[in-house]
Image (spheres, helix red, strand yellow):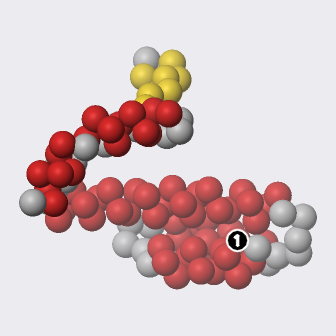
Amino acid sequence: MQELELLKNTDTVNELLARYGVKFGIYKNNTFKEQLFPFDAIPRIIEKEEFDYLERGLKQREVHRMVPRVEKSGMNYDKNKLDLIKKLVEETEVDYYKIVNEVETMI
């Protein structure tokens, strides 16, 4: 019964997302385009291998986002440790949670 109610309210949810400006941006053909974040009441199911691939990329993106924060923070940090973190990020099999925790301890 709840699934049916969620389907009925999809348009309302999308209207609220539009009203509050829930958006994301994409680059296509060297042009930045902002779009409303679409709500889909029916979850998309992906295979484990695809999820693992996406998860690795998202973790790597987060580490790449954090490293410049450390460098720009103006705080004292161990440059050798930060260089090691940068190198570890490039490896394929790496414990990103450990790296993120290491970076967070430096901020």
Q: Position of residue 39 (x, y in %)?
A: 31, 42
- Residue 66 is drawn in which quadrant? bottom right
Q: Which residue is mark 1?
A: 82
Depicted 97 relative to depicted 83: above or below: below
Q: Position of residue 6 (x, y in %)?
A: 21, 51
Depicted 54 relative to depicted 27: above or below: below
Image quarter hosting the N terminus? bottom left
Which residue is drawn at the image coordinates 76% and 65% (left, top)?
A: 70
- Residue 55 is drawn in which quadrant? bottom left
Q: Is residue 26 visible?
A: no
Which residue is drawn at the image coordinates 52% and 65% (left, top)?
A: 89
Which residue is drawn at the image coordinates 17% and 45% (left, top)?
A: 7
Q: Is residue 71 left or right of residue 67?
A: right
Residue in front for this viewpoint, 62 or 88: 62
Q: Position of residue 85 (x, y in %)?
A: 61, 71
Q: Position of residue 14 (x, y in %)?
A: 35, 37
Residue in front for this viewpoint, 21 or 102: 21
Q: Is residue 2 visible?
A: yes
